[in-house]
Amino acid sequence: MKKQFIHDDFLLNNDFAKELYHNYVKDLPIIDYHCHLLPEYMADDVVFENITQPWIYGDHYKWRAMRTLGINEKYITGDATDKEKFDQWAATVPYTLRNPLYHWTHLELTRYFGIGDLLTPETADSVYEKAGEQLKVASCRTLVTSMNVEVICTTDDPLSDLKYHRKLRESDFRVTVNPSFRPDKAILIDQDGFTGYLEKLGEVTDIEISKFSDLCEALGKRLDFFQDNGCSLADHGLEYLHYCEYTEQEVDEALNKRLKGKTLPDEAAEKFKCAVLHFLAGEYYHRNWVQQFHLGALRNNNSRMDRELGPDTGWDSIGDFPQAQKLSSFLNSMDKEGKLARTIIYNLNPADNALMASMIGNFNDGSIRGKVQFGSAWWFLDQKDGIIEQVNALSNMGLVSTFVGMLTDSRSFLSYPRHEYFRRVLCNLFGSEMQSGELPADAEWVGKILKDISYYNAKEYFNF
């Protein structure tokens, strides 16, 4: 009998790897401490009409693959029917060989729906029908709980009223769903929409924002509100960490000019960003939050498609921004003031892996286990090679044993097998070195380390 593509020992290429995965990490709960799931879907316990809705809507990984194959936008983000969009994705999947989408696709079909067939144009109708039948009785919450998820941290704008998080806390949903504070729109003064955003922030907080101290007061009120609603994490998506010398007068002048519709010189904009980031980082420390920095994305490269479809629709790539000096200066400034919160740095450029892995060691001061983390491989690096390279860099220059592990960073309710994917890759990496004699053949101790990386380190680090 032919073995299914996704089988018990998928990605596990030796006996040690199989023992580590099956006996130590396979059944551990999932802590998804950073994702982009919509809390309203969980609060209302949405039932999806078909597999296209939770699987293809909003997934710009799939959209990029389909566009590359020459599929018309009508069948990606356009007005085609859900079945037509699914059929075009099914036609794309066989061409995604060696892209992580091929693995993810078949893991997801197997784990959520028990479908072991490869997705092709020939199997598209049966897969669509089988998955659709199961989705009729598998609500949004069911999809999450079926993957043994324990904690979810969504990504939320400071303007959010968090009503769906409150609704979730009052419900019988056994998964903890907490908000995360994502204030980038209040920092990026040179971006379109900045002045309008500050107007809305002022309305929500009942503060007229005309100077830097007003902005700090308004953000402080939103931080209080988020904390009262279960938040203990902040997240930033920046090209690089901003650091420079500034005075409050310079920051006030920059804000005043921008509020009047004027374009700022780069230096003035940078001073403003540094000031706001410095204020927020200090607040995170005082509140005992974890701060996360996703660094290195070059966003909205295709201006024509950005105008047509907006951000987060698949037009971003890896940037090559200088990281070391400003990252060091920012962390050092907060540490020098005694205000460096628990920090996770995520890197998007593989050329900077060693840089990031070595940098965190400068600020792990013995006060907290793994206080400053080199975060999981993300976005374009969230694949087998990227995961291995991140783990290797961290192993070589730090302590991978203190690593807080995987997250989905996903908008899809069908993405939780990515934790399984990570665990399998991790077990195979360690198992291969046990097989070669580079690590001791002590499955109990190595298994303990992998259990920590897969679950227990995150549970302790975030105080969940």
Image: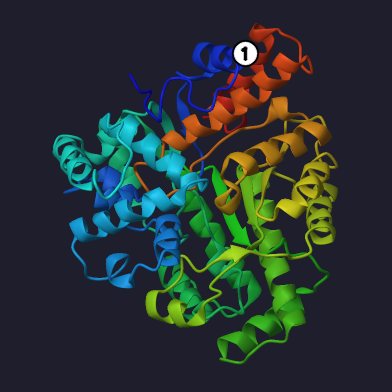
Quarter assignment of residue 415: top left
Q: Of residues 364 and 73, which is closer to you in this image?
A: 73
Quarter assignment of residue 187: bottom right
Seen in the picture, residue 350 relative to 448 is either above or below; the reply is below
Q: Is residue 459 visible to the viewer in this orientation of the structure?
A: no
Quick one: SS at disc 1? helix
Q: Which residue is mark 1?
A: 16
In this rendering, position of residue 323 left or right of residue 193 = right
Q: Is residue 73 visible to the viewer in this orientation of the structure?
A: yes
Q: Position of residue 380 (x, y in %)?
A: 58, 53
* Residue at left offset 79%, top offset 64%: 322
* Residue at left offset 64%, top offset 7%: 444
In this rendering, position of residue 67 left or right of residue 354 = left
* Colour pattern: rainbow
Question: Which quarter shows the N terminus?
Answer: top left
Seen in the picture, residue 220 relative to 433 is either above or below; the reply is below
The amino acid sitting under disc 1 is Phe
Q: Position of residue 52 (x, y in %)?
A: 25, 52
* Residue at left offset 76%, top offset 54%: 351
Seen in the picture, residue 297 relative to 301 is either above or below; the reply is above
In this rendering, position of residue 390 left or right of residue 150 = right
Q: Residues within 10 Å of mark 1 (few under 14, many from 20)?
A: many
Seen as rendered, the residue at the extreme front is 1
Q: Position of residue 124 (x, y in %)?
A: 23, 47
Number of labelled discs? Answer: 1
Q: Of residues 173 and 410, which is closer to you in this image?
A: 410
Q: Of residues 92 and 259, which is closer to you in this image?
A: 92
Q: Position of residue 251 (x, y in %)?
A: 71, 77
